Image: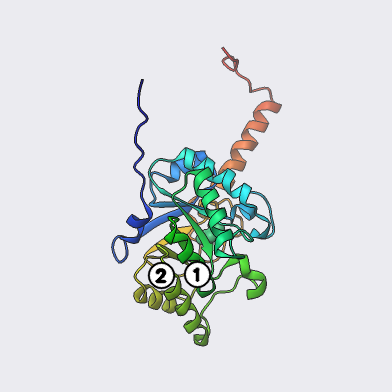
Amino acid sequence: MSTPKPVRRVSAPQIQNRKGKEPIVSLTAYYAHTAAIVDKHVDFILVGDSLGMVIHGMESTLGVSLDLMITHGISVVRGTEHALIVVDLPFGSYEESPEVAFRNAARVMRETGCGAVKLEGGQRMADTIRFLTERGIPVMAHIGLTPQSSAVMGGFKTQGRDKDEWAAHEADATAVAQAGAFAVVLEGMVEPLAAKITKQINIPTIGIGASVECDGQILVLEDMLGFNSSPPKFVKVYGDLGNAMEQAIKNYSEDVKSRAFPGEDNIYS
Ligand code: KIV
């Protein structure tokens, strides 16, 4: 009888230890097959609640359920063997109390096999982050532009354009670091503020639209591959897969219609 191969994944403490060292590389992924490709080149993969908008056609991330996150989390864990897998806690699954957050985060960890969870919010979530980390759940925080609260923030706006806002963001960063988060996503933040926060706290900052000054970067996979016809302004698009996919489907359709497909070998045998 063979024994299962031990899986040696990147851990949350290893990500934390990269502070000020080699930049941390990360991307989102929602499926086993894409995650398997991403896995070869990144330190961590985020199963982000952006999946609600990117692959389920929702208008915001607010409609994403815990069950949906777990379904995609399982798929991504199955497809990977190297990267740390971080699963987003969706809107409504953690804000009520540290106890509710623990129950749901524990369910995500247990059912998906992921290595950490991410939640949005700074000072207001510090007690919850402390509660989870003290009970064995590694937490990645997310501050700056927090899409789950975009309704109260007045939309998707870059944070810190007005210097009067800086103190609150700095206090958020300090609060999540002191509460035990192993890293923090800075989303949609002006460069000098992201640079200041990165210098001030002792955990890695992971930027998305928050400049090169962060300790690492994350992008939504479909945005950087060219599946999104109007990606956010800050996204560098590295591929043209949307058009390549359309061309392939068009070629297939033409082959079928002209009976160029199936060919002689095109039978199950
Ligand atoms: O849900 C998500 O994909 C995210 C990233 C944009 C950081 O939170």
Q: Which is nearer the N-term, disc 2 or disc 1? A: 1
Residue 90 point in image, percent of width and height: 60, 57
The extreme top residue here reads 269
Residue 161 point in image, percent of width and height: 52, 81
> Which residue does the image show at 59% across and 43% down from the upper left?
71
> Which residue does the image show at 62% across and 48% down from the upper left?
68
| Distance (Cα) linking label 2 and label 1 | 12 Å
Quarter of the image for the C terminus: give it. top right
Quarter of the image for the N terminus: give it. top left
Q: Which mark is residue 127?
A: 1
Specify whether residue 48 is in view: no
Which residue is at the front of the view, 169 or 260? 169
Which residue is at the front of the view, 15 or 265? 15
Residue 126 point in image, percent of width and height: 49, 70
Q: Is residue 95 left or right of residue 234?
A: right
Q: Which mark is residue 177?
A: 2
Which residue is at the front of the view, 6 or 188? 6
User: Where is 255 relative to 29, above or below?
Assistant: above
> Which residue does the image show at 36% across and 49% down from the upper left?
10
Q: Which mark is residue 33?
A: none
